[in-house]
Image: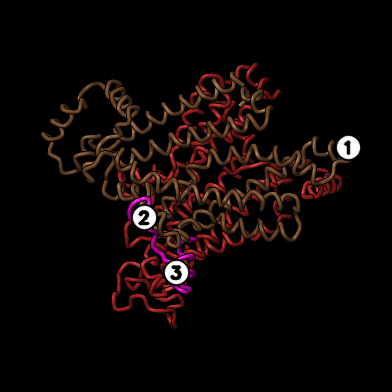
Amino acid sequence: MSLENVTVLGAEETAGADTAQSAGRLALAAFTRNRLAAAGLVVIVALLLFSFAGPLLYHTDQIHTRLALETMPPGTGRPLGTDSVGYDELGRLMAGGQTTLEVAFGAAVVAVILGVLWGAVAGYVGGFVDGLMMRIVDALLAIPAILLLLFLATVFRPSVPMLIIVVGVTAWLVPARLIRAEALSLRGREYVLAAKTMGVRGPTIIFRHIITNSIGTIMVNATFQIADAILVVAALSFLGLGIAPPATNWGAMLSDGLNYTYSGYWWLTYPPGIAIVLTVLAFNVVGDGLRDAFGLDSGHG
Amino acid sequence: MTRFLLRRGAQAIVVLLLVSVIVFCLLHLLPGGPARAILGVHATPTNVAAFNRANGLDSPVPVQYWHWLTGVLSGNLGFSYVQNESVAALLGQRLPKTAFLAGVSVVLAVLIAVPVGFYQAVRRQRVGDYVITTVTLVLYSTPAFWVAIILIDVLAVRLHVVPAEAPQGSFSAVLGDPSALVLPVLTITLVTVAAFSRYTRSSVLDELAQDYVRMARSKGAGNRVILFGHVLRNAAGPVVTLLGLSLPFIVSGTLITEYVFNYPGIGLLAFNAATTQDYPVMLGVVIVVAAATVVGSLLADLTHAVLDPRVRTAAGIR
């Protein structure tokens, strides 16, 4: 269905404006047709504004605890109540959103860079090197990321940069596999063979031809990586191995709230839980949209 | 088939060896090396040196690796000084409980997800498909612990249907308290159904677009014959592969679930080991799970090859 629309749109524009359609513009056209993906993008922008611009409008003290005001239900002046040490829950949600999104974006960038380089080299070089590099990926994939993360989190003191690296180095395996598959098919193309015959060196071919031509796969996977990283960071923090207080994130807030489920303090668990689901959902929907836009089969798992 | 078996088996052995190298590296990556990991951070340099001499940790690294590997292969996974018990014994007590919890949940998940995914693919872009796609997408974006918290809040705290804490004690005690198992099983099942049904839907959709479906249809085969005679068997292949590969994913979900419900399995064991810096136990869990994953994906590939002859011949290209 969407494919037909793209073709029709492309034909119209070529006839009218006499400009060749680049893959990027076709992709943009297909993406904007996907209303769900557009909605996801709006949600992401809203969440970024909420987390980063929100504290400028809604001032709260997120450093000093006020035990006199602990676990107050929502009311005037505190729309979402307060948590177990008296932090304003809405302000906490903003502060938690900042670290969650920072770590997720950072980790996705680290994972994608590592994975793209690894996969492109393996796929382009091929042979024994490829076999060995991919078996290493298989071996790491056999170890549940959560165990590796628990291990790393106990060795390195978690901070935002540390979490970015720790989550990034456990998440690069899927992009490595995807890009390796791309590289395998790209390295047999005429322009790569031509470049090779002209004496262009391997690294140049990898950067100029293999990676640039896999950009669709890379962008789609990066989007899903952000969604996954949010879940992973939240899980780590939920297990108490995230960032140390007074800094927080949504996972740590949920972990706190879990102790008060029996007291019925819903405002300590539902807001951060909904925030996590909404954010992950938005990135997944955008990823799906991008995948359709680039005409790819699969970019996840 | 024999060549495929040998090839795939050799690959699995290489991967297992690499897993062992990775775990060995992790053990040595720790500040202070394995001695500090085992004796704790407050060990004096003299103690560390004595420990190293006594356990052969002053010999060259390849020799150490060889000793460690032969030990692991003969079932010696190390000793937990924190719990004063051998790692193998600890795993032996916990593993059946986790295998039971994860096994029941995954069987339930497959029984739900495969028919649901199948139904969605056949009725794609109808109301039913849209509704289920939305539900599974939301569930897929929901962390296991948030599912667990909602379940506790609704079923245990508000409705008092089931207890929120998992059964404790020995394996038979765990089995003897089914109502306490409801929430942990439900949590893992829900999270797994979301992933599996999305996957089933897309692999059935792939199959429906194949030439053989069109061929069968043009020869006048009815929907029932096409779906249950052709598509089901062909789509089963990818689903079996998914099952083999999803063990790490299931372990992650199980670890979180065991933590939330205080279920005495290897997930909770690994978590407690992490908080007490009990590295031999952590790495023991890693080895066992990774080995199970490699063997699981090997079995899945072999099953896939039995179901679909094309896999055997195409294996060289993978």
Q: Give the number of marks.
A: 3
Give the residue at mark 1.
Answer: B219
> Left of B139 or right of it: where is B79?
left
Q: Is residue B246 left or right of residue A291?
A: left
Q: Amino acid at mark 3?
A: Ala
Position of residue B275 measured from the top left corner of the image (x, y, whole percent): 29, 50
Q: Are marks 1 and 3 in contact (CB under 8 Å)?
A: no
Assess whether residue B164 is covered by the magenta stretch: yes
Sequence-earlier tag: 1 or 3: 3
The residue shown at (12%, 39%) is B44
CA–CA distance between discs 2 and 1?
Answer: 58 Å
Query: Could you tell me how far apart the alpha carbons at marks 3 and 2 are, in whole angstroms?
Result: 21 Å
Task: Please indicate whether residue A207 sits to the left or right of residue B64 in the image.
Answer: right
Q: Residue furthest bottom?
A: A76
* Residue position for label 2: B173
Say whether mark 2 and mark 3 are on the same chain: yes
Residue at which label 3 appears: B156
